[in-house]
Image (cartoon, rainbow, N blue to C red):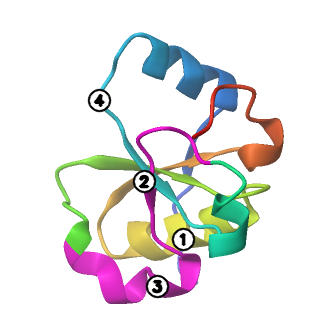
């Protein structure tokens, strides 16, 4: 049986505080185009979940990426996928439904 590594998480509140302190974070929003049109966290890069495998060259194994979706289910799946490939990932739990910070 394969042991699945736990996915590291970050809460929307923790993320908001890090951004407020000016921390340089790698945010990736994996929602669909029409969802992102309603607002994204400033500085996030939009790569739809289905497009992640084709965009692996965007990711750098030395950086940590925070993944975001509407409820944190899709971003969790992306995190498992990328973590399996050796990337450092973190899932924003609760997703955009729990995000109270600014959007653009």
The disc at residue 69 is: none
The disc at residue 89 is: 2
- Residues in magenta, as a range: 40-57
Image vertical order of residue 71 relative to residue 98, above or below = below
Q: Is tag 4's residue or tag 3's residue first in the polypeptide sequence?
A: 4
Q: Is tag 1's residue or tag 2's residue first in the polypeptide sequence?
A: 1
Rounded to the nearest angstrom, the CA distance separating label 4 from label 2 is 15 Å
For label 1, the crowd category at 10 Å Cα-Cα, with few meaning under 14, some 14 to 19 and many 20 or more, is many
User: Is residue 24 found inside the magenta-colored segment of the image?
Assistant: no
Residue 94 seen by the camera: no
Residue 100 seen by the camera: yes
| Mark 4: secondary structure | loop
User: Is residue 53 found inside the magenta-colored segment of the image?
Assistant: yes
Q: Which residue is mark 4?
A: 24
Quadrant for the N terminus, please. Answer: bottom right
For label 2, the crowd category at 10 Å Cα-Cα, with few meaning under 14, some 14 to 19 and many 20 or more, is many
Q: Which residue is mark 1?
A: 78
């Amino acid at each position: 049986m394969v042991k699945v590594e736990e996915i590291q998480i970050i809460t929307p509140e923790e993320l908001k505080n890090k951004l407020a302190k000016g921390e340089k974070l790698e945010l990736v929003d994996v929602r669909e185009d029409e969802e992102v049109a309603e607002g994204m966290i400033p500085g996030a890069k939009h790569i739809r979940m289905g497009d992640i495998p084709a965009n692996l060259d965007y990711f750098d194994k030395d950086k940590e990426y925070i993944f975001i979706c509407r409820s944190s289910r899709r971003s969790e799946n992306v995190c498992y996928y990328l973590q399996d490939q050796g990337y450092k990932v973190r899932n924003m739990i609760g997703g955009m439904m729990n995000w109270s910070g600014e959007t653009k």
